[in-house]
Image: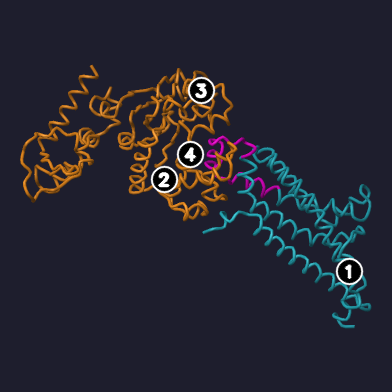
Chain colours: A cyan, B orange
Amino acid sequence: MTFTEYVQSRSDELTQAFGQHALVVAASMAIATVLGVGIGLITWRRPRLSGLAIGMSSGFLTIPSFALLGLLIPVLGLGWTPTVFALTLYSLLPIIRNTVVGLRGVDAAIVEAGRGMGMSSFRVLWRVQLPLAWPLILTGIRVSTQMIIGIAAIASYVAGPGLGNQILDGLSRLGSANSLNEALAGTLGVVILALLCDLFFLIVRRLTSSRGLRVR
Amino acid sequence: MFDNSDGGVGIELRELTKRYPGQSAPAVDNISLDVPAGELVVFVGPSGCGKTTTMKMINRLIEPTSGSIHIGGEDVLKMRPDELRRHVGYVIQQIGLFPHLTIAQNIGVVPKLLGWSKTKITDRVDELLGLVGLDAAQFRSRYPRQLSGGQQQRVGVARALAADPPVMLMDEPFGATDPITREHLQNEFLRLQRELRKTIIFVTHDFEEAIKLGDWIAVLRDGSHIAQYDRPARILGAPADDYVAGFIGAAATLKRLALIAVDDARFAGDAPVPANGLPEIDGAATLREALDAMVAGGTEEVVAVSGDMRRLLTYHDVCRTVQSEGQEVEHSVR
């Protein structure tokens, strides 16, 4: 069977795996975005606290994904829960860091002008600092997404959802019928998902960041 | 907020002090000063003398340690800071326009905070753009980064004027622009102020700018101590001490000439105006410019033109004018 024939014959299975892969990444990113931006908002004014948050979230990243998922089995069991948990932890660093850096990078004079005109500090944060930091925060979210699309493939080790099942299964029975096709199909699916996500963020960036920040 | 009905409000500072924890000397030490309604007072002094701190206490971006501030008789320290600031125009050197908002949205910030209707804000924005010399149709939908520094500062002034505050605080607003743009902005601002008659505190370290713009000048030294608070001509004519004299620098007389309009000179009177050959100078120009024209033309006489009237202004007229002004100054100082 050629690769094309394989993909055609297993299209249902592959589509489902692709959809689950996308879903587990989306769910993890949604949680991580709320958490990461929230932690960034709380800590950015306090260097010691934001240092701690960034240090811890980069600490998570040093744990090998294989080890983390395995260690989570006794606590969270198998399947979706440990997968989403691990992916969320991995995606925190770029989001927290870019939120902190983005908010700190807003020109102090702009903040002073806002306060000087009688905007409350919350209003300045919400209407001025956050919109100005947004492109950088969005970049953090995008980097995290790209990163965990790859890591999500390893989740099949804890019976997690997604294209990792095709890759792991294919590789484990390498040499038998269609094993290479299966692993290749899984890998290609991951690459396609990554490209689609990148496109998605390109569009989101276009739609959600002010034209005033892009001109000239 | 402030009762503006009788044409402006004054500002009173009483024993205003700002002390930062861990610093032995206060940043602002017990300053008391009155700013008359509708007049422009320049705080001038070296960097770090406390002039900006003094100004920022007035809109409470910095909270005073002690002392009182009244605007139009109302106690500023009893107001809600955000509410207060919506009624006090604020312009800073770095301008601080919001880059993600259009020019119209930038100017509309305070009116929006005050809950004006959309149409009222739009009309006001167009009016203000016209007032600061920018074509509304061309500029209202642009973004700050698409504007030159000078244009941005005009928008900064328009934004501060948006809700028609009776009081304006300006912190070296033209300090970051090149000399030519600065001169333009200063002239336009003077024209605007003659029309609007806001009560303004203007901070600068540029004494020339202080003379040019101020109705009054407060020369400040360390700790925001007032070295001298007087009319520009008096400070030039009778500096209170060496510190003030040092601040004025050389050529004080020439600087005073720059404060006197040609029309106000003491003309010798009936000297006939020669038909031609002499440089001409506009009556609204300053005596310094008249003197400049004399030196440039290698002559001791110029023709002062004010409307249909043509008068002969001589070098001696200029000297007599500045000397008599000097006597007036000394007289009034005594």
The chain to which mark 3 is attached is B
Secondary element type, mark 1: helix
Q: Amino acid at mark 1?
A: Gln
Residue A15: x and y, percent?
87, 69
Q: Which SS does the magenta portion mostly show? A: helix
- Between B263 and A134, the residue placed more toward the observer is B263
Say if mark 4 contacts mark 1, CB within 8 Å: no
Mark 4 or mark 3, which is nearer the start of the sequence?
Answer: 3
Label 3: few (<14), some or many (≥20) within 10 Å? some
Name the image quarter holding the C terminus of chain B: top left
Residue A205: x and y, percent?
66, 58
Whether discs 3 and 1 lie on one chain: the answer is no
- What residue is pinned by disc 2? B132
Q: Nearer the viewer, mark 3 or mark 2?
A: 2
Residue for point 85% across, 53% down: A84
Name above or below for residue B274 compared with residue A6: above
Give the CA separation, mark 3 to mark 4.
Answer: 29 Å
Secondary element type, mark 3: loop
Mark 2 or mark 3, which is nearer the start of the sequence?
Answer: 3
Residue for point 42% across, 19% down: B32
Residue for point 8% across, 51% down: B277
- What residue is pinned by disc 1? A166
Q: Nearer the viewer, mark 2 or mark 1?
A: 2
Say if mark 3 contacts mark 1, CB within 8 Å: no
Give the CA separation, mark 3 to mark 2.
Answer: 38 Å
> Which region is colored magenta?
A96-123
Residue B312: x and y, percent?
10, 41
Q: Amino acid at mark 3?
A: Arg
Label 4: few (<14), some or many (≥20) within 10 Å? many
Give the CA separation, mark 2 to mark 1.
Answer: 67 Å
